[in-house]
Amino acid sequence: MKHVLLTGANGFVGNVLLDQLSAGYRVSCACSVLNPSPRAGVEQVVLDIRDPMACAATLGRLKPTHIVHLAAISHVPTSFRDPLLAWNTNVIGSLNLLEAIKQKVPDAFVVFASSSEVYGDAFKSGAALGESSPCLPMNPYAASKLAAELAFEQYFKQGIRGVIARPFNHIGSGQSPDFVTASFARQIALIESGKQAPVMQVGNLEAYRDFLDVRDVCTAYAQLLELSDGREHPRVFNIASGQARKIKEVLDELITQSTVAISVELDPQRLRPSDIPFAVGNCERIREVLGWQPSISLNETLASLLADWRMRVVTEQ
Ligand code: A2R
């Protein structure tokens, strides 16, 4: 049976991907700490990807046929606050994993979760960016992901098998409220339950983003894993909807779905100076090669996000 190892398995994406892959794969999860409620039939290992010997030992023992590399410092403000942590995890951690693949499982097929953030300043063209657009990262997170991509490209040249994915803004249940749509949904749920005054604190509402449901992104990762069947394929894939949505439009829809009246207040602390005003991806490649396209509407995603936060705030202090 095909055996997939997920790094970063306890994260936002890892949790969803685990559900999707469990049907077709034996799944092992590499986590920085053990999940207290593990899934039945899924093996968990503790692995700090910054430790090269631990990476080699884990891959040597598990011998996965496939790997999805999700583990990262994924939050842009954290990468500004602690760039060494971001670079060590995102670049050196990826190199440690690549060396371990080369030494222990050289035939394994790896999907690396990079980010649309690598395009950075190139978004200022206003066009939907394709995979050959310039990569001009504007923050330490994006730069570290691009550096990791270069490392992957080098190992691909040496015969390691796999692809690089550049997902655009994926949202949904389980995401940290450090991210914009989760922050909105959490505040609405707090307001509805009387734990917050009926005033939403927001940052920049004028930016446009290419939003995707995390479940659609995970379907794309699962389809990318199927490229291990030996057919010719490109190395880099955008995972995008191709549609630009104004953040204000997303907020308005969430407020429409709320059961109470809510006003909106700008919080200057939530404004990021390096904000990119418009970011949208061209998704032709993944559609042509794999037939993938998003299947979940934004309103459906927002409804599930809100439902999730309504449950989560019950236990919040
Ligand atoms: O720090 P934890 O316990 O939350 O674990 C995070 C894990 N992680 C690590 N795992 C092993 N060794 C490390 N040194 C290490 N540092 C962090 O990566 C967490 O479980 C996971 C990342 O999850 P999230 O922050 O929720 O990211 P998300 O949204 O699931 O994104 C997945 C990937 C990331 O590479 C993004 O940059 C990419 O998709 O776009």
Image (cartoon, helix red, strand yellow):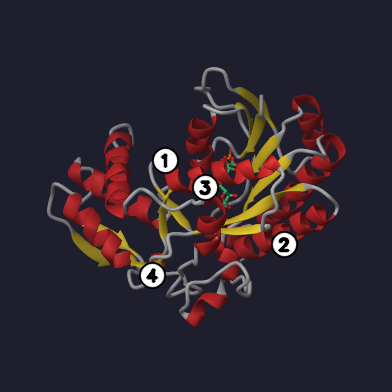
Q: Position of residue 48 (x, y in %)?
A: 71, 38
Figure quadrant of the C terminus: top left
Which quarter of the frame holds ligand 1?
top right
Q: Which residue has dot 4 on it?
A: 208
Q: Which mark is residue 220?
A: 3
Q: CA distance from mark 2 to mark 1?
A: 28 Å
Q: Along the polypeptide, which appears first: circle 4 or circle 1?
A: 1
Q: Which mark is residue 147?
A: 2
SS for dot 3:
helix
CB-based contact (under 8 Å), mark 3 and mark 4: no
Q: Which residue has dot 1 on it?
A: 174
Instruction: Identify which residue is drawn at 49% across, 66% down.
Output: 281
Kind of residue sitting beneath label 3: Ala
Q: Nearer the viewer, residue 141 or 250?
A: 250
Between marks 3 and 4 in the image, the one whose residue lies nearer the viewer: 3
Q: Position of residue 116 (x, y in %)?
A: 55, 62
The image shows residue 131, relative to residue 123, as above or below, that is above
Q: Along the polypeptide, which appears first: circle 3 or circle 2?
A: 2
Figure quadrant of the N terminus: top right
Residue found farthest to the top = 40
| Crowdedness near tag 1: few (<14), some (14–19) or many (≥20) residues, C-alpha within 10 Å | some
